[in-house]
Amino acid sequence: MLQIQNIRENQESIITALKKRNIDAAPMISKVLELDEKRRSIQTELDATLAESNKLSKEIGMLFKTGKAQEANVLKEKTAGLKEASKKLGEDLNTTAEELQQELYLIPNVPHESVPSGNSDEDNEEIFKEGDIPTLSEGALPHWELAKKYDIIDFELGVKITGAGFPVYKGKGARLQRALIAYFLDKNAEAGYTEMQVPLMVNEDSGYGTGQLPDKEGQMYHVQADDLYLIPTAEVPVTNLHRGDILAESDFPIKYTGYTPCFRREAGSYGAHVRGLNRLHQFDKVEIVRMEHPNNSYQALDEMVEHVKNILRELKLPYRILRLCGGDLGFTSALTFDFEVFSTAQDRWLEISSVSNFETFQANRLKLRFKDENGKSQFAHTLNGSSLALPRVLAGILENYQTEEGIKIPEVLVPYCGFDIID
RNA sequence: GGAGGAAUGGCAGAGUGGUCGAAUGCGGCAGUCUUGAAAACUGUUGAGGGUCACACCUCCGGGGGUUCGAAUCCCUCUUCCUCCGCCA
């Protein structure tokens, strides 16, 4: 959520920047400013009314104390009108503030200056590419065929017990997945991220805190009986760890990592591109989250990008990095880099990580602040990234590492797996 | 799930209708002293709105009510503690 003060002061530049997202924010902005104006004028009027009524109450108290009950009763009558007025003003204030809040929820984050304009993922800017694309032998298979051939992932079994998009990992497939999780967590810990195990269901406040609500209501599984949401990413519970906090400057940087299953309804996505592991309702992911001083957040973002690069290098997977264009940028993000692994057998790029700086957009909703050097409260910057999303990394490994003898295990994973080939 | 008790500032903990945004202690910050540190002493120290800056307004778990006036009384929700039940 954008800060109202920021909108007041920079409306022109905000509207210009939001054009990169292909939206004309001018009507929203002027509505917000209008409501803000209205809110403040009601507030001022209410304050004056309350001040008057507080003053009278004090006088009445004094009069009763000194035994002048009659004079007090005269004053009492005067308060009746004030009371009525302040009640009405209070109601107006609430409705206006609520309306303002709802409008503010609709405005996405302002893209960073480096974000290119564009309409869709076709306009994302490739900024880095690395790793050799393997030459596979004749008859190389996509991962869903490999999964069947070596009996390591069973999609039909998942359908039986739950439904489409909930695969069952078996034997060496399960072990490889667990190895990846452990390997990612170890790499993250090595880089100074503290491992956290967090709840997989969150309340509504947490959903609003990181921006999934109200924007992406339909994408989360909602447990209605208890009004809880299954997390779509560890970003939600981990970032909300500091909801409402006022940190000291010396608390920065705050670096967390966490492994969680993620649940996404992904309503309405079917077809060839969602086959196998490409898109699931439940998948595993290891996430990194940072809370930073605003002066340092872009350096932190670079560090996160470098960190993910290192992991992919070690796994020896061919990958590229994209700077997302305005049209593809997430609602809450100011700048996002996507990592994609090239899946040779599918002959396409698969998104495996997304690393973003939200600047103060989430912090404003979370009320996550810190005391600056002057002792003033300021919003912190929040960032997060996948390091990494499991299914597509798994798909990439299965497809790129397949040989006639079987699927080789990347060297760094062998100690975690306890075997070096799936055959 | 049943029965009782509780929720106050970073923490501990007073406050049961008016001068309480709230005593006191600890912690934090600044200073005095000291070669430096510690101790001691002095001062300072919640958040939000509003204003050029003041004034002023709101907040004592959340919401609602009584009253001229609520941290204090009433209703309700949530959470925590104790006991019982169930249970990985």
Image: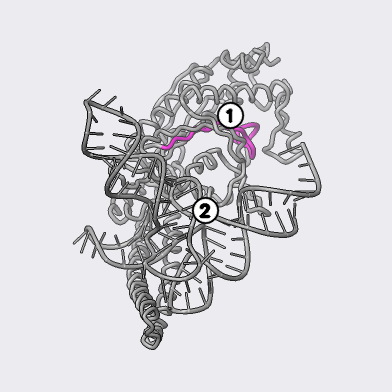
Chain ID of residue with mark 2: A
Mark 2 and mark 1 lie on one chain; the one further toward the N terminus is 2
Which residue is depicted at the point 50% across and 21% down?
A: A312
> Is A400 in front, or is A64?
A64
> Is A392 in front, or is B85?
B85
- Which amino acid type is shown beneath numbered disc 2? Pro
- In reply to whether residue A349 is colored magenta, the answer given is no
Q: Quadrant of residue A293?
A: top left
Image position, residue B19 (x, y; %): 36, 67
Write down the residue under mark 2: A214
Which residue is depicted at the point 59% across and 17% down?
A: A413
Chain ID of residue with mark 1: A
Image position, residue A94 (x, y; %): 44, 67
- In reply to whether residue A280 is colored magenta, the answer given is yes
* Side of B24 relative to B31 (left or right): right
Alpha-carbon span between mark 2 and mark 1: 28 Å
Write down the residue under mark 1: A392
- Which amino acid type is shown beneath numbered disc 1? Arg
Find the residue positioned furthest to the top: A405
* Side of A53 relative to A186 (left or right): left
> Is A369 in front, or is A284?
A369
Which residue is depicted at the point 76% across and 34% down?
A: A157
Region in magenta: A273-291
Kindly identify which numbered label has been placed on residue A418: none
- Quadrant where the image shows the C terminus of chain A: top right
> Is A40 in front, or is A177?
A40
Label 1: element kind:
helix
Q: Is residue B48 above or below residue A299?
A: below
Marks 2 & 1 on one chain? yes
